Amino acid sequence: MTLDDAQTILALTHCSDQYERALAENDVTVLDTLFWQGPQTVRYGVGENLYGAEEIAAFRRNRTGGSPPRTMLRRTITPIGTQAGVVSLEFRRIGSTRTGRQMQTWINTPDGWKILAAHVSIMAEQPETERPTL
């Protein structure tokens, strides 16, 4: 098993970029298509735990205004062979000093790459002296 397959890194970079665009534009149709459409799919958000594609889609549709705008700070893409991978992302919501974290496990399916599991969290406020330099 390789953790650095170049083609898988390119594919997951494209998928991650597509996800970030859809999130910024509140394009729930694209967001829905990026998640595996099954009961096994899990998304832990900042304030919610969602089980199954139906709960995730309902959350997106009921979220007024979509996700708060954010800036990507750092992204790491780790392929697990050529059939799965993890995208780890740090971000900062516009107007906030807190760092957010997002991890997504992607699987390569006959219908393309899909998110099987995701976790989003926001770190506690850090004193000015402990904040990373951007």
Image: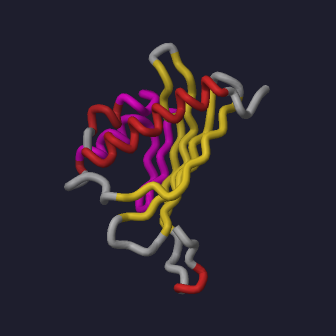
Is residue 100 or residue 37 the one in the foreground?
100
Choose between 14 and 105: the one closer to the eye.
14
Residue 64: percent from left, percent from top:
20, 55
**How many marks do you count on the picture?**
0
Q: Is residue 125 above or below residue 56?
A: below
In the image, residue 52 lies in the stretch drawn in magenta = yes
Considering every residue shown, the one lying at the far left of the view is 64
Check if residue 15 falls in the magenta segment.
no
Magenta region, residue range: 33-61
Relative side of 110 to 85, left or right: left
Q: Which colouring convention does the figure follow?
A: secondary structure
| On screen, residue 125 above or below 3 | below
Residue 120 at x, y percent in the picture: 49, 55
Quadrant of image for the N terminus: top right
Q: In the displayed image of the protein, which residue is found farthest to the right?
A: 1
Query: From this viewpoint, which residue is outermost toward the front?
Result: 134
What residue sits 29% from the left and 42% below the top? 58
- Please say if 4 is above or below 92: above
Q: Residue at x 36, y 28 (%)?
A: 33
* Relative depth, front residue between 48 and 130: 130
Q: Residue at x 30, y 48 (%)?
A: 24
Residue 25: image location, x then y, percent: 25, 45
Residue 2 percent location from the top left of the image = 76, 28
Residue drawn at (55%, 49%) of the image: 75
